Amino acid sequence: MIWNEEFETLPREALEALQLKRLKNLVERVTTAVPYYRKKMDEAGVRPADIKSLADLRKLPFTTKEDLRLNYPFGLFAVPFEKVVRIHASSGTTGKPTVVGYTKTDIESWAELMARTLAAGGAHKGDVVHNAYGYGLFTGGLGAHYGAEKLGAAVIPISGGNSKRQIMIMQDFGSTVLLCTPSYALNLADVMKEMQVDPKTLKLRVGLFGAEPWSENMRQEIEARLNIKALDIFGLSEVMGPGVASECIEEQHGLHIFEDFFIPEIIDPETGEPVPHGEEGELVFTTLTKEAFPVIRYRTKDISRLITEPCSCGRTFYRMQRITGRTDDMLIIRGVNVFPSQIEHVLMSIEGVEPHYQIIVDRQASLDVMEVQVEVSEQIFSDEIKVLEKLGKMIEREIKDLLGVSCKVKLVEPKTIQRSEGKAKRVIDNRKL
Amino acid sequence: MKVEQISIFLENKSGRLAEVAGVLATAGINIRALSLADTTDFGILRLIVNDTEKAQQVLKESGFTVGKTEVIGVEVADKPGGLAAILNVMKENNINVEYMYAFVQKSAGNAIIIFRFDELEKAIDVLQKSGIRIMRGEDIYAL
């Protein structure tokens, strides 16, 4: 089903005209309201009046996570603060998170986008939406929540965790639509098996899964084990949150980008130049309508490609292929973005701990587990077990506090962490997606 | 009054203990007493050897994390109640045992207990006042 027939099926020409109009307005707004953007535009020698066609977008400078970090927390907000009604945050690359804000209109747009996403998955009024995305600073929970309400569905704001209770509620409340990370969906399937609950006896029909990379294999596994259709959805807090792009139930092939709200580009991450049509590269987004926290050419560091062929569902929006990788070393652990530099930040702040560490990620019982191996230097070594165990627990706690995701710290002998070409290999990801 | 003990951090991987023993054997170092404390992930090997400095040096050179701690060696009669007598004194004086290990001396018929207390100086004082014999480091290294 198409939620907004008028916009989602706009002929390309009309869509591009709308994009241009909104782009001009965006550049005008941002240069007036945000000194940092004005300075970057000046340095790039470009003025709002230079944007005459969509191709002129390329004249504008990129925005990176570093820009966001430099303007922590509210430096890139483009409206007076009293217009901001919501603040969310995601992982930063160091000790501070990346902060985003929304006006009332932004929240309404976001609800519209998530209503479209849910509708693309076949959800409708009368459905029971089981929203197991985390509620809180993370955009997943509340973003999906507002969209489900706008759609007219009944939302169960169950958030993440406590799988047995989730399954009981699915049975008793008759959940029809499941929203969570794909790995959590598999974990629910595991727990159902343990509880001897046959998914066929549930009313679940479809699941919209996002916030972490997954594969076609995982899709098949989820569909078979939960007896549902599984769809990929995409979003990131810097651009909006969930609701940037989503698959349609008709094709389940590529995620339609809501292009009346966002302009996607695929660039060569090395040169910043656009890649040839249909080729893989780094995904870049410009937000056309956002008021509180607009971004111009935000580099996601996610790798994808654009599919421009028409889709049988009738939407005219281009599709992005599911994310195939990253251009940086960011990890996604249970839906939470984790940068190795954050772990380093924690270790460096503990006296005596050397910044020699390795992160080992694995998937056990469908859930991501992260082990951080820390070398025991003479400075932190003790002849007493309890002192070392206390240190390990303390590092675990500090990491959990900063990242919001738990890990296991393993103390290892010095020089056991591989050092290759003078630079250590920080991450070993053993997950098979 | 105090005995020097070296401790070595060991990951729980096969062959690590053998490696420590091999390094010490090559350097001609004799182990006097040892204990191994272990958790699921790692262990701490504590040793009293005839040449602490040298043992520490060769182990470090082999890439081990090595620490040095002062402990106390107490000689007790190898008969029932020997350990209880010492521990009672410690309890009365609120001194805690962090860890301990013991070995029996073959010639003298006495047992030697190595203690790591939370308050080392106070423990020495209390033991002496209670007439319990504390061994000199040299005597233990030379056993």
Image: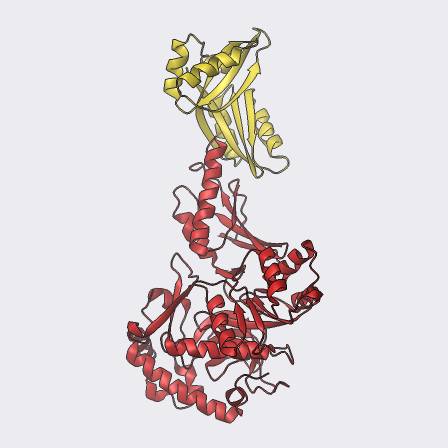
Chain colours: A red, B yellow
**In the image: residue A268, left or right of residue A222:** left
Which quadrant, please, contains the C terminus of chain A?
bottom right
Picture coordinates of residue A381 (x, y %)? 46, 35
Q: Residue at x 55, y 18 (%)?
A: B102
Picture coordinates of residue A355 (x, y %)? 44, 48
**In the image: residue A203, left or right of residue A21:** right
In the image, residue B80 sits, relative to residue A300, either above or below, namely above
In the image, residue B65 sits, relative to residue A72, either above or below, namely above
Q: Nearer the viewer, residue A340 or B117?
A: B117
Picture coordinates of residue A293 (x, y %)? 37, 74
Q: Residue at x 46, y 68 (%)?
A: A142
Does the image show residue B29? Answer: no
Which quadrant, please, contains the N terminus of chain A?
bottom right
Q: Residue at x 53, y 70 (%)?
A: A155
Q: How many marks?
A: 0
Picture coordinates of residue A317 (x, y %)? 54, 84
Does the image show residue A144? Answer: yes
Residue A39 image-quadrant placement = bottom left
In the image, residue A328 sits, relative to residue B129, either above or below, namely below
Q: Residue at x 68, y 68 (%)?
A: A223
